[in-house]
Amino acid sequence: MFGITISPALVWAIIGVVFVIIELTTFTFILIFLGVAAIIVSLTTWSSLTPGINSQLAVFSISSIVMMLLLRKTARRLFAGTNDVKPDYMGQKVTVIRAIPVGGEEGKYSSIGRGKTICNQCCRGAKTKSSARIGGGSSKTD
């Protein structure tokens, strides 16, 4: 219509960059691999290794799946923030071993015979030998 033609390599590069930018705002650790795979397809298309759409889609599919399977856990560990309380413990009732002050320091709790350290936001003001429910700031102590 307007006489503008865009090469397939440029289209794949734009798709890849868009996926990477979206990943920077979502931290799902899926779109980054799709973006990198699209950039790989862009490079292979630019170098004439994948001239047709079928070969481009095959390279995109294989490279994105392989990267997700091999690198997703590593990427999450490297870039995800650390949390003092694992999600497995959220909402569970535990016995407090060391008192947790309302305004500071970490406390200790016991869950199934193993002592774990938790942050003061989880069970504020919990007393020793009391029970506390682990939660993000809205926890209750019994």
Image (cartoon, rainbow, N blue to C red):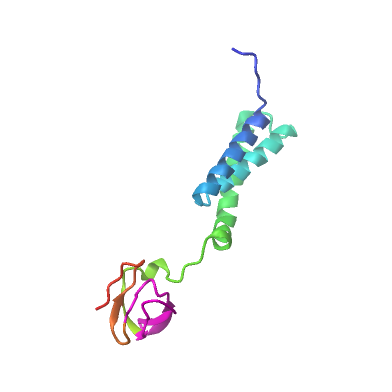
**Magenta span contains residue 103:** yes
Q: Quadrant of the N terminus?
A: top right
Residue 77 is situated, as x and y percent measured from the top left of the image, at 55, 63
| Part of the protein shown in magenta | 97-126
Q: Residue at x 61, y 13 (%)?
A: 2
Which of the 4 image quadrants contains residue 10?
Answer: top right
Give the main secondary structure, helix, strand or loop, of the magenta stretch: loop
- Residue 104 among magenta residues: yes
Q: Is residue 20 left or right of residue 95?
A: right
Name, please, the residue furthest toward the front.
103
Q: In the picture shown, does residue 135 fall above or below 79? A: below
Front residue (pair 76, 60):
76
| 77 versus 16 height, above or below | below
Q: Position of residue 133 (x, y in %)?
A: 30, 73
Q: Quadrant of the C terminus?
A: bottom left
Q: Please give the name of the residue rendered at 31% of the width and 72% of the height, measured from the top-left corner.
A: 92
> Is residue 115 positioned above or below 40 on the image?
below
The residue at the point 34 percent across, 75 percent down is: 124
Give 3 or 41, whichever is nearer the viewer: 3
Outermost residue, top side: 1
Between 80 and 34, which is closer to the camera in this rendering? 80
